[in-house]
Image (spheres, rainbow, N blue to C red):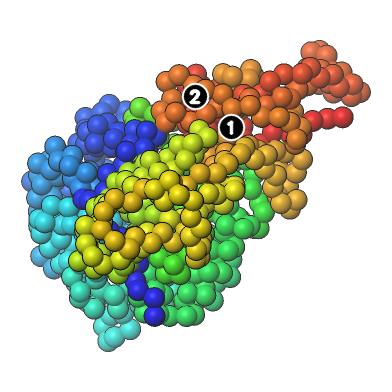
Amino acid sequence: MASKITIPDLKKIRVTDPLFSHYAGMVAKKMIPVQWEILNGKQGQSRCFCIDNFRIAGGTLQGEHRGVVFGDTDAYKWLEAVAYCANNGETEYIPQADELIEIIGQAQQPDGYLNTYFTVCHPELRWKNLTEGHELYSAGHLIEAAVAYYNATGKRRLLDIAAKFADLICKTFGDGEGQLPGYPGHQEIELALVKLWRVTGEERYLKTARFFIDCRGRTPNYLLREMNDPNHKVIFPELRNYDPSYSQSHVRPVEQKTMEGHAVRAMYQCSAMADLADIQQDEALRSACQTLWDNVTKRRMYITGGIGSSGLLERFTVDYDLPNDRMYCESCASIGLMMFGQRMAAMLHDASYYETVERALCNTVLGGVSAAGDRYFYVNPLEVWPANCKDHTSIEYLKPVRQPWFEVACCPANIARTLASLGQYIYAVDERSIYVNLLIGSTIETTLRDTDVRIEQRSGLMHGGALELDVRSSGTHPIVVRLRLPKWIEAPVFRLNGEEIQPAVENGYAVLAVNCAGEHHFTLSGSVPVHRCAANLQVRADVGRVALQKGPFVYCFEQQDNGENLAALRMAPDAAVEEKAPAEGLPGNLPELDVNGCRIVSTGVDDAELYADCVLRTEPCTLHAVPYGLWGNRTPGEMRVWVDTTIS
């Protein structure tokens, strides 16, 4: 049996890459302090009432609960981000975090229950609206925060709060006498209980996580039964005609063949399924994960790593339905896709899953936050015409500029915790190997087989240079560095201390042997060309269109560089592409692209008419593209990823 792949100690990882260190640095510098002000109701229109709700539930403040039913999670994800920043040595918000933890503890009920909405507003409805109430979802984020905070600080207060609530959940739900055979309408508790099991070793947490997966999809459907109860209290009117596939409860998870329903729910469920399949060596569950992964990445994912085609209910639709201007691509959904891919790679020791993890990170997740770290996209479009992004229309959810906050504020704190913990996606370890999964400048220190190892990687691949990997081993035991060989590197050449080598490649990893103590300097060089990408012919939105990609970065065209009405631009599929210097003011030093093309300047219809006989006239022009993950950081305007091919 292959040894287990695990996440290394995040305290021993530092991100140095100019792009990702900029964004990760913004978490402590901007995101955490601004979000703290918002959570405390001190940011004007962006203010929320999350912390006040905990005080009201704890009896230290008089008032009514305000905000969404799952608002507690804003505080939990903020705490998780603070924990990951503490791993990076950024501890200035630990005093505020400890203060918040005490406020949360005061809101916990004697039996362990913790949810401000139900405690303050409807204590009689506890566990009676799993479909909409988000009790278990909120509990999951509490547990994730508690595990992260304990690992970072060694402090048990939040972990004890979370464990007490988890014990109540384990007692409440199950197939035993007096237990509820229900499951969450929004998954999250499942993967969180696995994390709690890893820290505590308590089998009941793993057992309950498995129960929540196995009881899903039973007949009769538990969530439908809730919704059809005459006494059911509706929280979200849009869910009145409930479709069980929205919450992936339409069929048992192990039998699901296509990725259905709400994209974030689906990703969190699949992440838990992959965890359990790996821990319990469950082949049926593993096979279901593989089937669902293939369906989403080969038929239901955008080129940017975005998922969720429908703005209505933030969900998947059908294979190849990938509209660019009225999709959803929620930031949280791409984070969930990263979580799922990370687990699949660890379970199968297969680097190919990181092609998608990397795609989602470098495009949708980075695009979800401004370069200044103070504005966010909830929805990540591939095509924007600001004038038609109007309220009270079918695409009112689509914003042409990033927002400081949202009423449903899951994305800002989710982006913060992801960027602050980026090391868990860059590196992994097993008994004798270090896995380098993302080619992002960084360092790691760890111990394998009583051998202290330090790795530093620096990448110039996007600029025609090489990836440099300095490995220092202090012990006598040989170790292995497994370096992911991305598909976007062509004609790769490896060298060790200047001498060319030909390492074996196993499951997408180049196997670099370190057989003795000392310094070992590996380099990986190769070509990283710009690709002119097309979509499968079944993707109707992109037939006859081309997109540009260099390395893991998809590029887009903005109005600032190309003028208004980007729909009039045309590009030949074989047009020459020239790499240009990075734009001033954008982080990361990524090249920009110029490509020859043309613009339709007349269709034969004059300004006084709406339609007339077609007489097209074009003029040559140079199209200028910037990395999609950096769009919207300059002058607001139109944007598009896919450009139509040249008209003859």
Is the residue under label 2 in contact with that under label 1 (CB below 8 Å)?
A: no
In percent of width and height, residue 326 lies at 60, 40
What residue sits 64% from the left and 40% below the top? 531
What residue sits 34% from the left and 60% below the top? 514
In percent of width and height, residue 528 lies at 57, 41
Residue closest to the eye, 175 or 332 = 332
- Answer few, some or many: residues within 10 Å of disc 1's Cα (few below 14, many 20 plus, some between 14 and 19): many
In percent of width and height, residue 50 lies at 23, 43
Image quarter where the C terminus lies is top right
Residue closest to the eye, 412 or 171 = 412
Q: CA distance from mark 1 to mark 2?
A: 14 Å
User: For mark 2, what is the residue?
Assistant: 582
Choose mark 1 or mark 2, whichever is in front: 2
What residue sits 67% from the left and 54% below the top? 320
Q: Is residue 609 left or right of residue 152?
A: right
Q: Please tell me whether residue 498 is drawn above or below residue 162 in the rendered image.
A: above
Badge 2 marks a residue whose secondary structure is: loop
Q: Is residue 178 left or right of residue 621?
A: left
Q: Is residue 544 left or right of residue 383?
A: right
The residue lying furthest to the right in this view is 613
User: For mark 1, what is the residue?
Assistant: 556
In percent of width and height, residue 58 lies at 11, 51
Give residue 160's quadrant in the image. bottom left
- Answer few, some or many: residues within 10 Å of disc 2's Cα (few below 14, many 20 plus, some between 14 and 19): some
What residue sits 72% from the left and 38% below the top? 545
